[in-house]
Image (cartoon, helix red, strand yellow):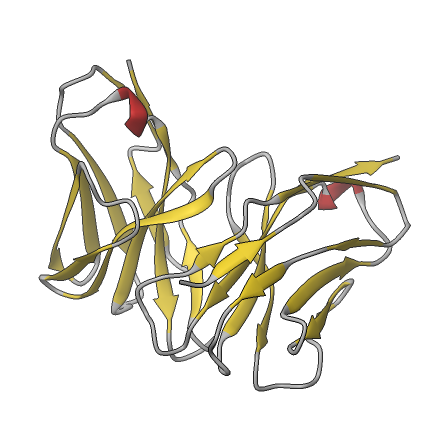
């Protein structure tokens, strides 16, 4: 079974600075989807960004971008110009396109933004 | 907004009592899921549905049952609640057409079993 590992339980960043959250995964598949979700104190799970494994270009959504290294099975999230509202738990997730019954999540990284 | 509504949002119940959580969606998605979230575990799949009356087990299905009699509703039942089922429960749907099989979540239901 695929596993997702987030090795940083907690991270902190100064407001307006850049932070990178790490995620690695284990799979034998060649095609899959990767996601980052944000969970603020409200506990709502909010999709931040998604990446299809067959795409070589790294996904970008405004201040959020990923560094997808397929061979290394690494999928890090970079947050630029950090804002106080970015403070949240961030979860990395993996899903196989041929498997509609599951998405594997990492344990999460708690991001603190310092003013 | 994926049009997902969970009810109740908060519930406290006693050990041994049955509990049903409801997930309602408004956009006719085929796939629906129930996850639970516990510290240190991220989210884990309990059960999922791939159509009306079509359901299957996930990673942590023991002690839970589900039903889907209509496309829009997916019910999660704890037949006899235990303290280990104290958790936050998330319903989710998968959007196949517009967003490339992305899973979207409801707002969560907080369940405390005392």
Residue A61 in picture, x, y percent from top left: 70, 68
Rendered image quadrant of residue B30: bottom left
Q: Let me know if residue B1 appears in the view.
A: no
Q: Is residue A17 above or below residue B55?
A: above
Q: Position of residue B45 (x, y in %)?
A: 33, 51
Q: Up-down: is A37 above or below B18?
A: below
x and y, in percent, of residue B91 in the image? 34, 49
Q: Residue at x 30, y 25 (%)?
A: B84
Judge by depth and name the residue closer to the eye, B89 or A5: A5
**Location of the N terminus of chain A (image quadrant):** bottom left
Q: How many marks?
A: 0
Foreground pick, A81 / A19: A19
Can residue B23 be seen in the rendering of this structure?
A: yes
Residue shown at the point (66%, 78%) measured from the top left: A71
From the top left corner, tell me how far across and down residue B105 is, in percent: 42, 53
The image quadrant of residue A67 is bottom right
- The residue under the point 31% across, 66% down is B27
Q: Is residue B57 left or right of residue B5?
A: left
Residue at x-position 32% and y-position 70% = A100
The C terminus of chain A sits in image quarter: top right
């Amino acid at each position: 079974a695929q596993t997702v590992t987030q090795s940083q339980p907690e991270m902190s960043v100064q407001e307006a600075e850049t932070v990178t959250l790490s995620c690695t995964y284990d799979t034998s598949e060649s095609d899959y989807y990767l996601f980052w979700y944000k969970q603020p104190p409200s506990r709502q799970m909010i999709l931040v960004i998604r990446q299809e494994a067959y795409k070589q270009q790294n996904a970008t959504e405004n201040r959020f971008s990923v560094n997808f290294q397929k061979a290394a099975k690494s999928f890090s999230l970079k947050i630029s110009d950090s804002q106080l509202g970015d403070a949240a738990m961030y979860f990395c997730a993996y899903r196989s396109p041929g498997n509609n019954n599951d998405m594997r999540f990492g344990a999460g990284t708690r991001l603190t933004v310092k003013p | 907004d994926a049009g997902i509504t969970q009810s109740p949002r908060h519930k406290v119940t006693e050990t041994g009592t049955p509990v049903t959580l409801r997930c309602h969606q408004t956009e006719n998605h085929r796939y629906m899921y129930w996850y639970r979230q516990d510290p240190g575990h991220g989210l884990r799949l309990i059960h999922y549905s791939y159509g009306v009356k079509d359901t299957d087990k996930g990673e942590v299905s023991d002690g839970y049952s589900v039903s889907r009699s209509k496309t829009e509703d997916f019910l999660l039942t704890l037949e006899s609640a235990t303290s280990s089922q104290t958790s936050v429960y998330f319903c989710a749907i998968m959007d196949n057409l517009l967003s490339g099989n992305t899973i979207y979540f409801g707002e969560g239901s907080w369940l405390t079993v005392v």
